[in-house]
Amino acid sequence: MTKPVSRRSFLGTIVAAGALGGGRSADARAYTSPQSSPALGSSNGLALLGGTPVRRTPFPSWPVADAREEEALVRVIRSGKWFRGENVSAFEAAYASLTGAKHCLATANGTSALITSLAALGVGPGDEVIVPPYTFVATVNAVLLMRALPVFVDSDIETFQIDARKVEQAITGNTRVIMPVHLGGSAADLDTVLAVAQRRGVTVVEDACQAHLAEWRGRKVGTHGRAGCFSFQASKNLNSGEGGAILTDDEALVETCYRFHNNSRSRRNTGDDFSYRNTGANLRMTEFQAALLVAQMTRLEAQARTRDENGAHLTRLLQQIPGITPARMYEGCTRNAYHLYMFRYDPSHFSGLPRAAFLKALGAEGVPALSGYSPLNKEPFLEDALSGRGFQAIYSKARIDAWRAQNRCPQNDRLCTEAIWLVQTMLLGPRQDMEDIAEAVRKVHAQAAQVAKGLPLA
């Protein structure tokens, strides 16, 4: 099985793999496989087998920074005010304005945003939270830290998102929150999720950690549910190394979130006021993170437009290659943030070449790609958590057994064997880069039989 990758590590993996760029133009016309393949070691042969790679220069690097970030950090250093203050407030106001939300609360990271939101909504022992099985582990960890049960709903294999059509059947009297993830920067089916939530009286918290500036029907994701959570971790399209934010239109909720993320101290607490009303944690954003984010936001829209254009063009190219199926967007997704460019790989159209070998051949052509997530609902840590003393004290054996019985996601199991990812930085260059990516895939398609016959992979 291909080793799974985390959101936190995949960008570094791509850089370490030597993402190569620049090179010949691919033919954008309809593709048909040639009748014969180039000889082993020829200039047109697969680079994996001694040929010339499609690309030899890097894709755009990340992060992008210049004097704006340097000056912002220097100002914070010289101010002597490093604790949450005017820079955090400035970022919160700017991000709320950008997304159209009434309120924004900055947090230490995206996981903190999820934890804070669930805690503020009162999620706790005995409750259930509906989550997708194809996501980063933070989505589920936040639920487990509340001592609630994560209830997995299968993936829509065509979109890589939670299958919203299956959400309602997973709701029980214990369901407190539905947490759709806008995976890869595309949007989950919010029309269906929100309708089910309203009908059943369940709260929606959007995990938009990968979806900065993505939209559902012209409105930014993260602003449709009761709360929306974002991450600004180093790989994200808006980056401060670490950082997070909660969006909401609910003034009472944002104040509850504020108290929780500030060790139960409200905005009215002064430095010598040590009275407390709730439990909480220290999940605050620093002035340094906020200053970086305000500087990074000056490029965000232009970078998003470049990804928009390149993502759409790459889809047109890859759709012409047998065995390659780009992730479909729902009709309501009016903007894809393209934190990931995702597609599915069918080895039957590549002479039976396993996905791992396809990835290695593609990487040799200078187009590194990843296999994505493993089935989160099958990770051993879930059983470890549910078998632990805390969960055993809360949940009966019958309830845990029932959870195990319903914890099946066959479409997601299949998705995890077919998925391919390209990271967001690969969409930040010129259109020629998309041509090169498509040419590399075509080249592997045309010569896959040579690799599948058992020729060496190194």
Image (tube, rainbow, N blue to C red):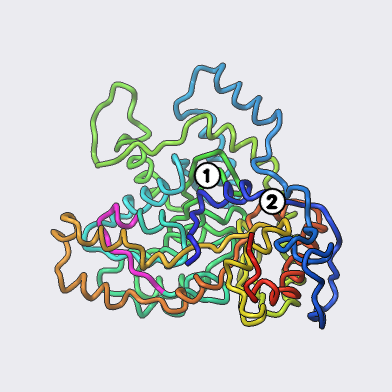
Instruction: Please name the residue shown 48% across and 54% down the image.
Output: 6
* Residue positioned 69% across, 77% down in the render: 449
Disc on res. 19: 2
Which of discs 1 and 2 lies nearer the camera? The answer is 2
Is 160 inside the magenta-drawn segment? no
Q: Residue at x 41, y 56 (%)?
A: 137
Quadrant position of residue 315: bottom right
The spot of residue 113 in percent (x, y) is 42, 48
Q: Is residue 363 left or right of residue 124?
A: right
For badge 2, the amino acid type reads Ala
Q: Which residues are magenta?
A: 142-153
Taking the magenta stretch, the answer to whether it contains residue 143 is yes
> In x, y percent, where is residue 253?
38, 50
411, 191: nearer the viewer: 411
Residue 419 versus residue 242 in the image, above or below: below
Distance between mark 1 and mark 2 Cα atoms? 21 Å
Q: Which residue is mark 1?
A: 233
Number of numbered discs on residues: 2
Helix, strand or loop status at disc 1: loop
Q: The residue under label 1 is which amino acid type?
A: Gln
Determine if residue 182 is in view.
no
In terms of image quadrants, where is residue 320?
bottom right
Q: Is residue 92 above or below residue 197?
A: above
Indicate left or right for 376 with 69 as reference. Answer: left
Left or right, 447 with respect to 123, comes to: right
Whether residue 118 is visible, yes or no, is yes
Q: Position of residue 308 (x, y in %)?
A: 72, 60
Q: Nearer the viewer, residue 324 or 191?
A: 324
Q: Is disc 1 in contact with disc 2, using a CB cutoff of under 8 Å?
A: no
Q: Residues within 10 Å of mark 1 (few under 14, many from 20)?
A: many
